[in-house]
Amino acid sequence: MRVLRFSGFLPVATVWFWLINPAHAQLNQPVYPVYDGFYVTEDGTYVISYAYFSHNYDTVQVPLGTENAFGAEPTDRLQPTTFRPGHHRFQCVMVLDADFQGGLRWTLTYAGTTTSTSEDMLQYNWEFDDRTKQSVLRDVDVANAPRGVCLNRSPLVRILGLRNGPDGEPPELTVNVGDELRLFGSTRDEGLPRDQVLVSEWRAIEGPGNVSFSAQDEPRTLATFDTAGTYELELRASDSVFESTTRVIVHAE
């Protein structure tokens, strides 16, 4: 059995090679826990984050226990048990009191390989920059958050390839009436609460006619419009506690 330790990013060249070579991403490959870094608030409270990288072609499960555990009690800190393909940052964000000294190692065993994060967690080079802090602190009430466990945060919802306008207005698309419009939505979540699943849904908020979705409960879908005019569509994702949405304007001609 191989034992490896990872902190921070995997080499960019390695990640890119795996992403563009699906033949090298398959089942029964290792899942690597990764330490993202830390942030110290003004009162000395620590906010730390873990990620993971899965080389598997499909989603895999690593159950709690010796194969998925933190090194210090409690070994179950609400860490992920479901691992999607690829590299996923900020999948376990924790708040710890000012007396935290590091050494909180996360270990995963999958496909015969055991990998762990480093215990050297508080070196200056792991401290988040201002931009990363915004991603880490999203939905985190530091003062009132439970200590030492992964926090549930709202899902991330977006439409791939599109950006909002300079004042936050939804992006705009154009399609002919009766033609199919491909919508490449994306919904992501850290998997909490564990007894729930992430639910996605497309719906038409405004418009002069009917909108048909090929897969209304899937982030990636085809939309068809039966009447010319301007429509506003919304992609929603809910983990049963938090909900997130994003919208797009479609001009049907």
Image (cartoon, rainbow, N blue to C red):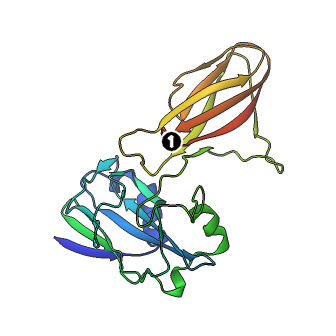
| 152 or 187, nearer to the observer | 152
| Number of marks in the rendered image | 1
Q: Would you place residue 94 above or below residue 27 in this image?
A: below
Spot the residue most to the left: 1
| 85 or 49, nearer to the observer | 49
Quarter assignment of residue 196: top left
Quarter assignment of residue 14: bottom left
At 62% from the left edge and 44% from the top edge, which residue is drawn?
158
> For numbered disc 1, what is the local secondary structure?
loop
Q: Would you place residue 228 above or below residue 81 in this image?
A: above
Side (left or right) of 75 relative to 210: left
Q: Position of residue 41 (x, y in %)?
A: 60, 75
Task: Report which residue position mark 1 lands on.
Answer: 241
| 239 or 99, nearer to the observer | 99
Spot the residue most to the right: 167
Spot the residue most to the front: 144
Q: Can residue 9 be seen in this view?
A: no
Q: Would you place residue 130 above or below residue 162 in this image?
A: below
Q: Can residue 210 be seen in this view?
A: yes
Packing grade of label 1 (10 A; few <14, some 14-19, many >=20) is few
The N terminus appears in which quarter of the rendering? Answer: bottom left
Q: Position of residue 124 (x, y in %)?
A: 54, 86
Q: Position of residue 3 (x, y in %)?
A: 23, 74
The C terminus appears in which quarter of the rendering? Answer: top right
Q: Would you place residue 137 above or below residue 234 in this image?
A: below
At 63% from the left edge and 39% from the top edge, which residue is drawn?
245
At 51% from the left edge and 61% from the top edge, which residue is drawn?
145
Side (left or right) of 162 relative to 25: right
Q: Position of residue 104 (x, y in %)?
A: 36, 75
**Badge 1 amino acid:** Val
Side (left or right) of 29 relative to 91: left
| 130 or 22, nearer to the observer | 130
